[in-house]
Amino acid sequence: MPQPHLRTVVVLAAGEGKRMKSTLPKVLHPLLGRTLLGHVLSAAAPLAADRTVVVVGHGADQVRAHLTEVAPDATPVLQAEQLGTGHAVRIALDAVPDGAGTVVVINGDVPLLRPETVGALVTAHEEAGAAATVLAAEVPEPTGLGRIVRDADGRLEQIVEERDADATQRAIREINAGIYAFDAVRLREALGKLSTDNDQGEEYLTDVFGLLRSAGEPVAVHVAVDHVETLGCNDRVELATLRRLLRDRVNEAWMRTGVSLLDPATTWIDVTVALDRDAVIDQNTQLCGGTVVGTGALIGPDVTLIDTVVGPGASVVRSHAVGAEVGAGATVGPYAYLRPAARLAEKAKVGTFVEVKNSQIGAGSKVPHLTYVGDATIGEQSNIGAASVFVNYDGVNKHRTVIGSHARTGADNMFVAPVEVGDGAYTAAGSVIVDDVPPGAMGVARARQRNIEGWVVKRRAGTAAAEAAQRARDAQGASEVTGAASDSEAMHGATETVGGASGTGDTATE
Ligand code: UD1
Ligand code: CA
């Protein structure tokens, strides 16, 4: 019986990444929605490998913890001392059962690698029946990288590290991308013969190619179509460059599927985000994590959405949202802050300087201005007056506020939870609502106003205020004498306000 042809993926992620100058292991640095390691693993995912081994070393605990999150099927293998890439692969293979098949090795720090490219490398390797195939690329700036040295016939002779290379070899611009496919049996054999006779005294995986070639085994080079995919990440300047390159790739892909990006240069979309056709993304916008934007929605300018779902036709302007849901046709901002479990139903509105946390805002309900809504349920078609606070925290426990449907609460209310305002109820401006307001009732909770006539003229005599007051009183006296109509009543019902129940003289903003 033929041996099963297994595919094993080995990701090398034990290095420290000294030049990152970070307490975070290099492969855990984030790049548009995934870590460097996460990108590499997802590039290898379509290979559907029988097993995936990740060699960990520096920050092993952190890397292992990350793997349980993003790739629970991968096996971490500890390389306690980083004695070279060849040593790392040897340790990885020691941890898996012997057998024939293909071993794909990927450096953990090449996040722009595409699944298609890994697939093409493996296919070329397997179809050619090669002992080893290296992914190569012609690059403008080869400094620091291993060079592909070919013989007179153009066949791979060896891979030479820059520090071990002579001047002629250094002039080569075809480099080793750090991504390989090997025949498992021949790889194991060659790994056992690696020397440490090089400038770094390490076991180089790249030496496997020279060894196999000398033994007459077929070794091959697969040239990447786009060298950008092979760019590694060694410091934060390179990380920023990779981020820009990935941004451009992601943005172009979305535009080609029918999403408008008004300023792609300032639009940063994680690879994990999903956008529907005809969404419009305005400038200075970041869409992160599990964010989903529905068709026809308008996002931006100046918006950050993290793990937030925006329904079709909704709009979010100059706002920050984390773990929120914005229903179809709902509007958010400018200047709103949606925190986890803020849920806006269809056509709800959260306006300017409004913060919402762990609250449902029902269909068509509005929280237009300057308000904190925490731990609340608001029914449908209700309006929350400006400058209100849902007082949810007693210093020890959080409590809920429930506002019914078609309710209109006055401006500057405090809802001291737990408290409930019934369907169709109103509350008066400036109220501190500590008791439930039954459906249809007007809740008033504030002291009555008292005017002390003539106080300023008497107690602040000689001030501009007193003089102005005196002039107004004189004029009023004159108009009373002539019987002119006062328009103070019209002033009371100024635009943007609606009168409260008659007798309270309250107004609520809309
Ligand atoms: C390596 C290649 C070089 C290639 C370059 C591409 C070797 C000897 N050289 O060089 O030809 O052009 O990648 O980026 O392989 N690692 C371990 N354990 C170790 C050493 C390294 O896990 O003992 C990991 C690192 O974390 C990293 C990867 O292997 O993810 C590559 O190691 P690195 O030291 O960056 O190799 P380069 O010098 O860049
Ligand atoms: Ca490197």
Image (cartoon, rainbow, N blue to C red):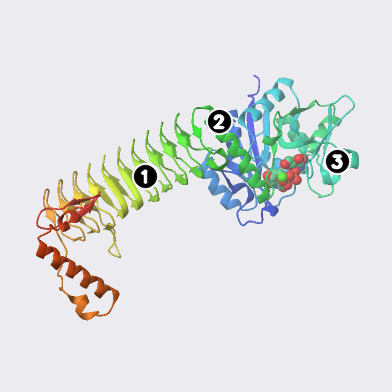
Q: Residue at x 21, y 77 (%)?
A: 457
User: Which structural element holds mark 1?
Assistant: strand
User: Which structural element holds mark 3?
Assistant: helix
User: Which structural element holds mark 2?
Assistant: helix
Q: Is mark 2 within 8 Å of ligand 1?
A: no
Q: Please tell me which of labels 3 and 2 falls first in the chain.
A: 3
CB under 8 Å between discs 2 and 1? no
Comparing 177 with 453, the one in front is 453
The quadrant in which residue 276 appears is top left
Q: Which numbered mark, 1 or 3, is in the foreground of this view?
A: 1
Q: Is mark 1 within 8 Å of ligand 1?
A: no
Q: Is residue 136 above or below residue 65?
A: above
x and y, in percent, of residue 7 in the image: 63, 29
Q: Callout 1: few (<14), some (14-19), or many (20+) C-alpha neighbours within 10 Å?
A: many
The quadrant in which residue 317 appears is top left
x and y, in percent, of residue 197 in the image: 85, 46
- Three-letter amino acid code at the position of disc 1: Val
- Three-letter amino acid code at the position of disc 3: Arg
Comparing 40 with 183, the one in front is 40
Instruction: Say if residue 447 shows up in the picture.
Output: no
Q: Is mark 3 within 8 Å of ligand 1?
A: no
Instruction: Say if residue 404 shows up in the picture.
Output: yes
Q: Residue at x 17, y 64 (%)?
A: 446
Instruction: Identify residue for label 2.
Output: 253
x and y, in percent, of residue 396 in the image: 30, 64
x and y, in percent, of residue 406 in the image: 18, 44
- Three-letter amino acid code at the position of disc 2: Ala
Q: Callout 2: few (<14), some (14-19), or many (20+) C-alpha neighbours within 10 Å?
A: few
Q: Which numbered mark, 2 or 1, is in the foreground of this view?
A: 1
Instruction: Identify residue for label 3.
Output: 170
Which quadrant of the picture is home to ligand 2? top right
